[in-house]
Image (spheres, grey):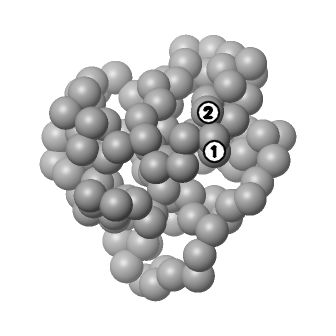
Amino acid sequence: MGENYKILLVDDEYDIALAFTLGLQSNGFSVDMFTSPIEALSNLKVNFYNLALLDIKMPEMDGLELAQKIKDKDEKIKICFLTAFDLNYQRVKEYSECIIKKPISIDDLIKKIKMEFE
């Protein structure tokens, strides 16, 4: 699986973003990584990505606001949220049922992503 799957990854923690990016790329996914939601939005390739992996708690703009702005431009993209915190799941579920709790291993991350495309 992985092949031809394009992922937009946005996490303000560089080390986490890089680890996820390298792990996904080594499993055949194409990943565009950003640590700034503003930068990710300004570089968004519409109708290009299969999935956006978005951290929820970020400075500048949280992942929920980013998800809304992405969906306004590309309604077909699937959204998956990354979080290390307890959160308001009702608000999150307005955008996606896919919530990935950090920390997570690359293997488990890939399993969760594959489930989104079955």
- Residue at image coords 63%, 15%: 3
* Residue type highlighted by circle 1: Ile
Residue 13: x percent and y percent? 54, 49
- Can residue 74 be seen in this snapshot? no
Image disc number at residue 65: none
- Can residue 82 be seen in this snapshot? yes
Kindly indicate whether the residue at mark 2 contacts the one at mark 1 (C-beta within 8 angstroms).
yes
Q: Residues within 10 Å of mark 2 (few under 14, many from 20)?
A: some
In the picture, residue 35 is in which quadrant? top left
Tell me the residue that label 1 is attached to.
16
Element class at badge 1: helix
* Residue type highlighted by circle 2: Leu
Q: Is residue 111 left or right of residue 55?
A: right
In the picture, residue 48 is in which quadrant? top left
The CA distance from mark 1 to mark 2 is: 5 Å
Image disc number at residue 18: 2
- Residue at image coords 76%, 54%: 104
Residue 98: x percent and y percent? 55, 60
Q: Is residue 81 left or right of residue 25?
A: left
Quadrant placement of the C terminus: top right
Q: Is residue 45 left or right of residue 77?
A: left
Q: How many marks?
A: 2
Q: Is residue 90 left or right of residue 17?
A: left
- Residue at image coords 43%, 72%: 93
Camera-nearest residue between 76 and 81: 81
- Residue at image coords 42%, 72%: 92
Element class at badge 2: helix
Residue 36: x percent and y percent? 35, 43
